[in-house]
Structure formats: structure tokens, C-alpha cells
Amino acid sequence: MSAQTIQADAIGLVEVHTFQHGGPLVLQNGATLQNFELVYETYGQLNSARDNAILICHALSGHHHAAGRHHPDDAKPGWWDACIGPGKAIDTNQFFVLSLNNLGGCHGSTGPKTINPETGKAYGPDFPQVVVRDWVTSQAKLADHLGIETFAAVIGGSLGGMQAMQWAIEYPDRVRSCVIIAAAAKLSAQNIAFNEIARQAIVSDQNYLDGRYEEADKIPNRGLMLARMIGHVTYLSDDGMGNKFGREVKSGEFDQDESIEFQVESYLHYQGRAFSKYFDANTYMLMTHALDQFDPARGHAGDLAEALSAAQARFLVLSFSSDWRFSSQRSQEIIDALITARKNVASAVVESEHGHDSFLLPLTRYTTIMKTFLQRVLDEMREGGA
Amino acid sequence: MSAQTIQADAIGLVEVHTFQHGGPLVLQNGATLQNFELVYETYGQLNSARDNAILICHALSGHHHAAGRHHPDDAKPGWWDACIGPGKAIDTNQFFVLSLNNLGGCHGSTGPKTINPETGKAYGPDFPQVVVRDWVTSQAKLADHLGIETFAAVIGGSLGGMQAMQWAIEYPDRVRSCVIIAAAAKLSAQNIAFNEIARQAIVSDQNYLDGRYEEADKIPNRGLMLARMIGHVTYLSDDGMGNKFGREVKSGEFDQDESIEFQVESYLHYQGRAFSKYFDANTYMLMTHALDQFDPARGHAGDLAEALSAAQARFLVLSFSSDWRFSSQRSQEIIDALITARKNVASAVVESEHGHDSFLLPLTRYTTIMKTFLQRVLDEMREGGA
């Protein structure tokens, strides 16, 4: 065991690394990126057998900084610090955890803000539309670079869960287990509708300028704020919001706009405004389109079981009772297909009032199930077979 | 019986009337309108006892034109024509139906588009914020004008249901029965959040100009379109949208924007664009604030049963299984309070996949229940007691 076992359950300081892929990548839409970079972080130690790696796939607004802190005085740790760390659900005492910013992202990996070598200007809206499969392909290049042949687990929530599923389909022999949380095998019409409304909010911002806002030194932050507000409401549950805010009038804790009457409005303004300061509009457009387009069954006449037939991983499919953006019914469709395809699948619907955002929280039943599942994967590896 | 009984179930041509209230109206917020006009329509005949009148209260985007056609070549009849007409749920062979455009509306009644006599310019954003109680007060003035002392029924869906509830509270002796459909005794935090996002979509439109767009000869139609798209998605159900659109790609039936990929996006664009051409942004702001603020229990320490204690009406409370904007749980809160207050209440949750919009549709169980309820009210009146 590593020295980390003597720490408490905090990872401590973490560093950002950059992977340079010094060659072309042909994307699913036919476009070619001449080269690309991915920023990533790792937590825990890769063992000598190089078989204890876990890949974390992020969701719509996520990034590589999943756990720990960059500086001792960081106000907050990474976005999934509640679940990743020594002794936590994803136990860095046992696993080597890899977390990256996806291609097309806005946190350091090659994306719309990157300089396009062909024009000398940032790609902006001309960055090619990547899809979930492109992310998986580029993540595999990073795994190659790190000498990881097989992941002990690929884990993701929401859009991250879609990547985990695609991994199991695309690289059956490189994924020992696959944890799909609060996801869906494809978006529903309502899901697509909410994404389109968020996109229209961005496009309608006078500063969006067809995505060429950086050239004009503008930022479409009203549009991004609105997009985030829409997303945020749909990530929470009616009951959860009711318990958190009810019909309380604004208290001054969040935004103080004079037009605001209720605390819930104030909170949404605050969230939306904060998001608009750190997220890129072109990345938001790209990520939501990738979400809309994910549908691994499409190439199999709509038969998801058929699409999953090649997978060899042990699956864990989790959903949350109050999540209405990616409801348990959507997870059940994945579970049903896995059963039909005769795969090894465990699943649970976790009671929670926190809606879609539940997947980010250290809910006891949720973390216990995930930790136990991963421990079993490790035990099976040690016994020499999965 | 009137000559209308020999017609089919269509009302035929209807006329718009205007009620001039030639005096001041003091609003709940303390502001005074020196006078006001309400446009209205009537269907069926007021009997000699003047006791067969039904008041229809409209929802957020509704208006006075609830049934029939203004011109023989109108493409569509009024918004509730499915439920109002000879032999229909609200039977114009038996009842005299009154439908008006609310104060603050944008379809002819005094509202933001009206010239403010004090400035000689349209009120615009300076039109005073009216609330549900102000609507009920102004509707009562119209009833006085028409010589209607007591309504056989006051009926409304959504925001209209809130008006019906307020009528029963405010004028106990003027409401024989009260039909509250797909409504709530107050908005939840999630409801308020969706309204605030819609308002922010309007405010963010560069043409909104703090509501002074008419003076500048502009229309914030992008903002209105977005607001309507948000509303529309929340008025439908996930399953209903799935059955209607699934993940079909756009077909050309609706909007054809080249950025559009799925049929559901195309449909929402079409709906939003159409709405932005006939609705006024300041009215939208005003109506949503009125929705947010409705809470008759507020003056009774949050006790809805106490708020309803004065009511004398027979109540019918209806909701729809797939309505998540105003769920059956919200209706149950009203029913529970009515039971606690020892009122006469019938209720039903109608199975429907059409979400909140179900209240506009002629669903068999729904219309049968409403028709039977209203027939019983009539029978009791004829027997001389309610």
C-alpha cells in the first residue's frame, strides 16, 4: 500500500498534466484534428501490474479537476471530491484514478478556445462537432500514453455515463467494469427540447455573434446564464427545491437584483452568473449536441441489447428516485438491454430528493453500493478472473 | 330552449364586446387605474332568472376568445372550443358562458399596450402589477354590468383555476360552483424558477429595452420565443413528447433552421415563433408575476383550509396524471384543504399523457365529469337549493 493510506480521506494537493497527441485524429463526422491535447489529473498510485486504473468521465459542465485541491487555499475541491479519495467510494488507496477534460472542452483540452493551426485564430464555432465516441477514442489514446491497457472501471454520471457505456461497447477488452450513473441510452424528446432551449438562449444573446464572440472581444454571458438556469432547474427536483427554498423571499445570500422576489430566483441568478464566468458558450453548444446525438443502438436498428452484445464488462447501473431529467426509467432501459444481452449487471434506484444532481453527492447508499461493487471487481482481479 | 339546440355542437360565429368601467379601480398593490376596459365574449343565452351564467377564467397565455369563430374562414376556433358549445362539457344549450381577457392582457383589455391617460403613451412596463384578486374584482364589475348576481359556475384551468378559487373565497355568495383544473394553491419553487427563467429570457433580449420596446418600435420576439419554448416543454409530458416526436429528425413540417436536427426542436421553434408574433412581452412578465404571487393562504398563516372557510360553492378539482408543472399532488393539497374546511368537493385525477396542456383537450373522462358536475349544479338550482 502507498503512503497515502496514512492520510485522512482528503486527497490533498493535485497537479494538472497535459497529454500531447502528436498526430491526427479522424473524428466521427469525418473531420480531422491534426493533433490534440488533453489535460488530466490522477489520484492514487498505478500499481506495478498497471491494472488498478479507474477512468472518470465528466458530464456536460465538468472537467478534469474531479478531486483534491490545486492550492491549499482553494475554496472548493474538485467536483467529485465527495466520492473520490482515500477510503471513499472510489478509493484512491486502492485505485489509480484518471480524470480528464474532454476534447472540445473549455478547461485546457483542445477545443473551441484553442488556436486552429490552419488559421492562426481560435477555432470558436468552427471546432468540429465531436460525439461521445470521439471522446472515448481520445481517452483511449491517453490511456495508451499512460500505459493503461485495461481499466478496472470506467465510471461516469449523466453524459459521463454515456461515455462509460460507449467504452464498454468500443473497447470490450479494455474495460473490466463499467459504472453508469443517472444516464440514458439516448435522450428523450423532452431532454433534447431542454438542450435546444439552452442553445437558443445562447444563440439569442447579442454577444454570441454566431460563435465568433472572442474575436470581437465579447462574451455571451446572458445567454450562458440563462442556459445554466434552465439546466439547473432540470437537475433539481420539485421537492428538493421546495425543501431548499420553498416560497421564501430573497434573503441577500445570493443575488440581489431588485426585480427578484423569491429566494429560488436569487439562487438561480447566482448559479447562472457564476457559470457564465467560467464556461465557454461554444463548448456548451458542442456538448449539448453530443448529448443529443448519443444513441449507440442507432447502428443496430434501435436494438440496444445488440449494441451492447460485444461488451465484456461487469456493469453497475445507478439512478435516483427524484431525477426526472434522466429518470430511473431511462436507466431501466439500459438494465433491460444488458439483461437481454446476457451481461453481468447490478443496479439500484437510490432514494434521494436531489434530482439529477444526486450523482455528485456522497449519499450513503449510493457510495456504499459503488464502493462495494468496485471492491468486488478488485477481489475478482486478485483471484485472477472477472 | 333556444334556437341553438338545433345546431350541431359548434357555436358558430361569435362577437367581441367591450365593457367600459367608467371609474377608478384600486389595485391590491395600492395603485389606482382611473378606468379600465375588458373585452369579452358570451356563448349561449342568459335565462330570465339570470342564474345560468358560467365564467371562464383564462390562463397565462389565454384570452377572451374561448369558443366559436370570429369569421367563417378562421383557421381555428377559440382556445377552449373543445369543451364549450352546444352539448359539450360546458353546454351552451343550458348555460350562458362569459369569457373575458384579463386586466393587464394584450388582447384588447386594458393593459401594458393601452394608452396611459396621464402620459399619453402606452403604459408598457409601467402598467401596475395586477394579481389574481384584482382580476376577480374586475371580473365582478363585468358581472355587475351584465346583471349577473351569481354564477352557476366559475371555471378555470391553471392560472384560471387560481382565479376560480379566489372567486369562491372573495365572493362566496356569487359562486354556486367552482371548477379548479390543473391548478395549485400556490406555486412551488420549481414553478417560480421556470417563470423566472422565462422572464429572464425576455429581459435578456436586446429589444426588450426595460419594457420600452414599443416606444423604440422594437419587439423582443427572440425573448418571447424562448419564454414560450420553456413554457411549452413544461406544459407537455416526457412520454407525450416521446410519443409525438421521439427522436425523429426534422421533417419540414415545422421550422427548417439549418441548426435544427430533431423534429421536437423544429416544433418548439415553430410554437415559440408563432407566440412571439401575437403576445406582448410586458403582459407575459405581468402574468407570470401574478402566478408567482398567488397564495390565498398567506393571509391566514399558511392555512389554506382557513382561507377557504368562507367559500359556499360546490367544488370540482381536476388534475391530470402526466401534468408535472401543476401535478395532481398540488390539486390534492387543494382538495385536502377543502375537506378540512368541510366544503363540498368532488375530484378526479384524469389519466392523460398530454401533461399540463391536457386541460385544453376534450378527453372523454374529463369532459364527462365536468358535464355531469355542471348538470348536477343546474338540477340543484332547479330543485331550489345547492
Image (tube, coloured by chain):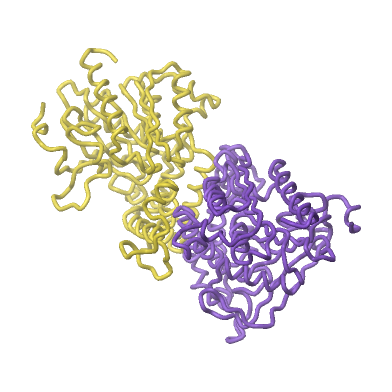
Chain colours: A yellow, B purple
Name the spot of residue A384 as percent of width and height, x first. Answer: 23, 12
The quadrant the C terminus of chain B occupies is bottom right
Q: Is residue B374 left or right of residue A122?
A: right
Direction from residue A340 to residue A88 in the image, left or right: left
Please provide percent x and percent y for residue B353.
61, 40
Residue with the most extreme top position: A384
Report x, y in % for residue B324: 53, 46
Q: Is residue A32 above or below residue B109?
A: above
Question: Which residue is nearer to you in this view: B305 or A116?
Answer: B305
Task: Choose top left, top right, bottom left or bottom right for residue A168.
Answer: top left
A203 vs A68, left or right, is: right
Vertical placement of residue B92 versus B116, above or below: above
Is residue A129 in sight in this rendering? yes
Q: B170 and A283: which one is in front? A: B170
Count of picture labels = 0
**Can residue A213 be seen from the camera position used here?**
no
Foreground residue, B299 or B182?
B299
Q: Where's residue B96, x and y in %?
A: 79, 61
The quarter of the image holding the N terminus of chain B is: bottom right
